[in-house]
Amino acid sequence: MRQKGLFRFILVLAMAMLVVAGCSSSDSASGKSDNEFKVGFAIKTQDSPYFVSLVNAVKEYGKAEGWKVTVLDANGDTAKEAENMETLIAQGMDLIFLDSVEPDAAVPSINKAADAEIPVINLDSGVGEGAKDVTTVYSDNKQNGRLVGLAYAEKMGDEEIKAIILSGAKGNVAGDERRTGLFAGIIEGRTGVSEEEAWKQADALDDELGKKGKATHEAAKFTLAGQGWGAWTAEKGLTAAEDLITANQDLTTVLGENDQMLFGAMTALSNAGIEGVDIVAAADGAKEAYDLIKEGKYFATGENSPTKVAQLGVQIAKEILVDGKDPWGYPDISLTEPAAVTQENVDEYYEYGF
């Protein structure tokens, strides 16, 4: 009897050890039980509706996956951003989202995270060379601009376009892409050249604008009477637009690299008593702009949705954390689908605005 009892004891013990080993193996394969991952988000600022919406969307989608999301705000300070990244690394995050203040300044922090085996996905803003990041997720600035330009070319037919353009900041990559995208779309739509050729001519037009402060594409009947720098805000957009509008009372169009600067331009036009000028943004997607589009007071904007950027970023994070996908197998850039939002389709995109 004692031998049978001993045999049963050994058998039960062996089965228990197998169960424990199986659980251990399962946990190590998934990394966490029940997908309870810790995810950080180092955001550069929350001083505009776009960034607030981006943070809220990341938190919402992360929570839906059962993740604990920690958000740290740099308030536009690169030193604070580096400190925030150090904090998230020290807290042992499983993955970090980053919307960087300045591309090159963020590289050392990203590489520290990589050395700690914490993947970093950039949202909204790209980073400098040498960063060991997973990918950068943002809207397709070039194609957003191009699609808006094509739509505006169709709207204007053979009518001469005399425009000014409001740009965000000199050397800003997103701004450059949006601006040349607008030019390419207008040139392509009004001359019938190929997209490839339109991009070449748009770059040449932008070079002329940068050197002379004005530029003309004769075949497209498209004149840029001036460029103002509005620092992405309505207040600075107003200031930048005022002198250009005063000097060019016969404008057909105000182009812009985002919605906020164009809101400022609309105020400048109103103050000057000028009506009938088309307002055309290469990209953004503020609900205020969508409301104006519905009213016919704003021609179009390209879709730059923080909700869709967050959605794609969390999808990639889930593939890495839950599905075990190789974080180093992603392209450098992961883009959301571009769209020109006009009066004809604004209702389709409204819920994704900010």
Image: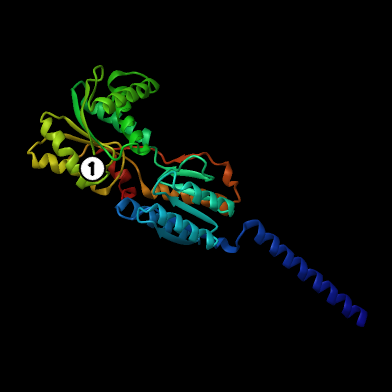
Q: Residue 88: image x %, image y %?
A: 49, 59
Q: Position of residue 154 (x, y in %)?
A: 26, 26
What is the image's colouring? Answer: rainbow
The quadrant in which the N terminus is found is: bottom right
Under tag 1, what secondary structure? Answer: helix
Residue 65 visible? The answer is: no
x and y percentages locating residue 180 in the rendered image: 33, 30
Percent across and percent down for residue 215 are: 24, 24
Q: Nearer the viewer, residue 105 or 48?
A: 105
The type of residue carrying mark 1 is Met
The image quarter containing residue 179 is: top left
| Residue drawn 31% across the image and 48% down it | 353
Residue at 55% from the left image edge and 61% from the top image edge: 92
Question: Is disc 1 surrounded by few (<14), some (14 to 19) or many (20+) residues within 10 Å?
Answer: many
Residue underneath mark 1: 261
Q: Say above or below: 61 vs 2.
A: above
Q: Residue furthest left?
A: 273
Task: Tell me which corner region of the image, top left, top right, bottom left or bottom right, holds residue 193.
Answer: top left
Report if residue 140 is visible in the image.
yes
Residue 174 occupies quadrant: top left
Left or right for 225, reference 103: left
Please name the residue shown 30% across and 31% down the image.
182
As drawn, 228 above or below 221: below
Q: Residue at the front extreme? A: 79
Q: Is residue 132 left or right of residue 1?
A: left
